Image (spheres, helix red, strand yellow):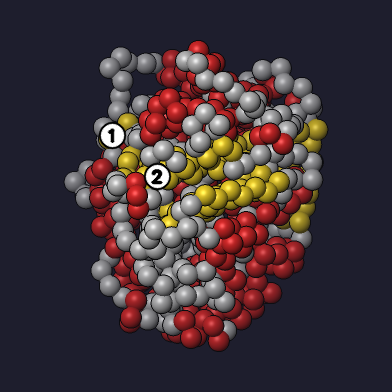
Amino acid sequence: MCGICGELRLDGAAADPGALAPMLARLVRRGPDAEGRWHDGPVALGHRRLAIIDLSERANQPMRDPDTGCVIVFNGTIYNWPELRRELEGRGHRFRTEGDTEVILKAWAEWGERCVERLHGMFAFGLWDPRARRLFLARDRLGIKPLYYTLDRRRLRFASTAQALLAAGGVDTAIDPVALHHLFTLHAVVPAPRTILAGVRKLAPAHTLTVPAPEGGRRFALRRYWRLVARRPDFLRSEDEWAEAVRAALVRAVERRLRIADVPVGVLLSGGLDSSLLVGLLAAQGVEDLRTFSVGFEDVGAERGSEFEYSDLVAERFRTRHHRWRIPNDEVLARLPEAVEHMAEPMFGQDAVAFYLLAERVAREVKVVQSGQGADEVFGGYFWYPRMMAEPEGLPEVERFRRHYFDRDHPEYLRMVRPRWRGPDHTRARVAALLAAQEADTFMDRVLALDVTTLIVDDPVKRVDNMTMAWGLEARVPFLDQEVVELAAQVPPELKLRTGGKHLLKRIARGLLPDAVIDRPKGYFPVPALKYVRGSALAFMREVLASRACRERGLYDHAYVETLLADPERHLTRIQGSKLFHLALLELWLQRNVDGNSDQSAARIDQH
């Protein structure tokens, strides 16, 4: 797990190796163990390393293949690299290291652009092929690892974070009006390739982008190499058979994420079903000395700030080496701006700061953790799924979705923004198109597939990556294992949603976990100080929204802001987010990450 960056000149000039320095400086915390740079002609590549596999210096990056001259910068983990290495050795390839980075280089030499189809894991990488004179960018199937880029007529730059690109300069920081609409109606999800900034784009999950140097003689090529298919198999499975198939796939997923590391691996234990099940499955496989980590906050009114009563039950049952921390609410607010600086894009999930503060403490103990993100989307755990399914069949699918998910309907969005930002309902059109594009049998299959392949990428998955990597901590997500996701997509939705959701996971957990953990009401990572905005939190958000920078930016309608400020706890989204927090978070993100790095005159990126 690392931070990567690079530049490819498109105008015939030599790359500027000096551009790597500011980008790498913003990536230090993603990779605190080593720094590497490489440049030749039109290309320059940079890398910050978090050493997890093959801890020796020979595994540092950028890594060059002496047989082909190809050079790679890679962020992520390939869980099937030992198997791929054996296959490649059988084809005559020789290896100098004991890790996954070199396996990608050899896989490129053997299979070219199709190599990504062989990789099982989470990854984002840039690979320069000097023979073909082209740069190859790739991102894993489910977007677990980020890859941002800027592009104009002179050059392409890429990096693990938007902040690294901004640090190098020359980026158009104007607000993208379509992305703004998505941000405030789709729970901060801005589907690729857009971001909130007009000059920053991101490679979509399960895609590759081939960029030729001027002398390469080829056009840009954007390719999708994988699709999730949510259709029933030709054979029928009973509930027992589905449960056993899912259990076996999850066991393989957690075992892979434990085995592929040369450092200890812990588990983020929230006290919910998902993370508790990870602990239980690892213990059932005979893993000893399990390390688990929990965080909690102060209560606010009736809102509980921790789930220690459940995480303690799990830690005690499996006798884990457990760490738990209770963080005062005043620290949450004081550290919020710091956490926002590490968000590659604005994130409205209130638990982002919780992950940030938890990761800070966990990183002092281990370098790698497993986390339960993805289980709700893959196995149908959210309360809005049954409500969507219960809507009349004759209703347009986007309408069935909107009624239970959109943070703001279009008329409210028009009231929220100033006249210059008003326009058509971009989100409704985009979601309708995304639903229609899913390879799925039913409406709920399409909803779940959309969530897994698009919505989750720019909400919980990005949140976990950004907030853990801010402390040099690698988070692995077994519920987003390719095999698990593909299998779960075949499960009938009504079976997933039975017994209040995640029915199959509850079946698997019964007898393994305490019943109190399985049968408890579904919880969320609680940060009540940011959900119920009052006291010092309200004063802070009022200050942000009244700031000179916010007024001059001119995004928000004054009357709308005043309505939220007058009674913020009355204004929650359909999925229980604070609307006031949304407005303040975007403005704070722009102030901390963009103001001072602004270049409104830079050429805008062409759309792919």
Please name the residue shown 40% across and 44% down the image: 133
Q: Secondary structure at mark 2?
A: strand
Q: Position of residue 225 (x, y in %)?
A: 35, 35
Residue type, mark 2 in image: Arg
The Cα–Cα distance between marks 1 and 2, rounded to whole angstroms, is 36 Å
Which residue is denoted by mark 1 in the rendering? 440
Element type at mark 1: strand
Task: Specify the quadrant that holds the C terminus.
Answer: bottom left
Q: Is residue 354 left or right of residue 377?
A: right
Up-down relation of residue 300 to residue 448 (above or below)? below
- Numbered disc in front, either 1 or 2: 2
The front one of 459 and 325 is: 459
The one of 597 and 427 positioned closer to us in this rendering: 597
Reading the image, the residue beneath label 2 is 134
* Quarter where residue 309 is shown: top right
Q: Return the disc, 1 or 2, that comes first in the chain's sequence.
A: 2
Query: Is residue 58 toward the left or the right of residue 413 in the image?
Result: right
Q: Is residue 339 visible?
A: yes
Residue type (three-letter) at the residue carrying disc 1: Ala
Image quadrant holding the N terminus, namely top right
Residue 375 in view in this figure: no
